Amino acid sequence: MSLSLTSSTIAPKGLAQAGLSRKGPALFWTLTEGGRASLEMAGFLVLRRRLLKSLPKGDGHPVVVFPGFVASDRSTQPMRNLLEGLGYDTYGWGLGRNLKFNAVREAKMNLLLEKVYKTHGRKVSLVGWSLGGVFAREVAKSNPHMVRSVISLGSPISGDMEHSNAGRLYEFFNGKPDKTMEDRLSTIAEAPPVPTTSIYTKTDGVVAWKGSIQRPGKTPSENICVPASHIGLGVNPLVMYALADRLAQAEDQWTPFEAEGLKSFVFK
């Protein structure tokens, strides 16, 4: 069964007290990411038609999908195609590769949300893969009245860069955090004031799974654990099931994910 939790800030110094290690992912999972992701993509391609028939259909509301670090909208195309087939109007973020984060790029993400919201006249669901999930949550914090829910996939939402193997590469492109960014990182773990779901995997080879756990706070939120690789999260059939289930909820009627019966063997 998923953990029905709500989020609050956990600064790196408080991770030990919360029982969460600051270590990155195990080397074995990192080294096997490519092979596992290939199998997940193959499974997605084989099962795609069945997924379209069996997954809950959407109500047509818009969904914006943010790619992971170093990735672009191309990486989220299979996921968005599936969601289109389920009845959603989906959008990529349209900002090329996800390499740098600055005020200009953040403003463009906020403008994208505003444009989609005004185009459809409906609240927007935000889905973010890895670092894209961090961005989705931050966009929702700035515009909660436009956001229906936020779903992150293997995202380092603890605000502690030690949880990700990509931390040094991120610093290469963005530089070491200055005082403003350090202050921003200290609030990353705070959930936006909308329902949030963190889908994560304990076999993540890029972001340590403990860095994706949401903690108790004021807004409705949950953690759903699936067997997957980090690179394969955007195509893993089990992730697609959980994602479709979460998006299909009626607006303002959010309830925690239930993994009963046989589902309890794969969803934790």
Image (spheres, rainbow, N blue to C red):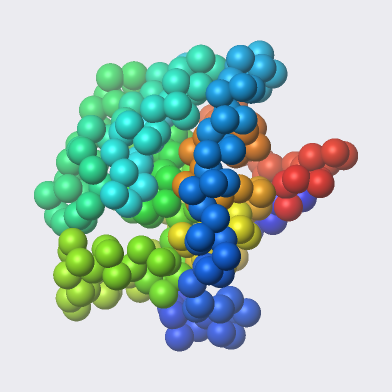
Residue depicted at x 67% and y 45%: 256
Compared with 90, 131 (above or below) is: below
The one of 91 and 30 positioned closer to us in this rendering: 30
Residue depicted at x 50% and y 78%: 22
The one of 182 and 216 positioned closer to us in this rendering: 182
In this rendering, position of residue 145 left or right of residue 225: left
Q: How many marks?
A: 0
Residue depicted at x 49% and y 72%: 24
**Residue 205 coordinates in the image, percent (x, y):** 51, 60
The one of 244 and 5 positioned closer to us in this rendering: 244
Q: Can you tell which quarter of the image residue 112 is in?
A: top left
**Residue 157 coordinates in the image, percent (x, y):** 44, 61
Compared with 149, 55 (above or below) is: above
In this rendering, position of residue 7 left or right of residue 265: left
Compared with 109, 138 (above or below) is: below
**Residue 101 coordinates in the image, percent (x, y):** 21, 56
Residue lying farthest right? 261
In this rendering, position of residue 252 left or right of residue 178: right
Q: Is residue 238 visible?
A: yes
**Residue 76 coordinates in the image, percent (x, y):** 39, 33
In this rendering, position of residue 39 left or right of residue 142: right
Residue depicted at x 35% and y 40%: 66
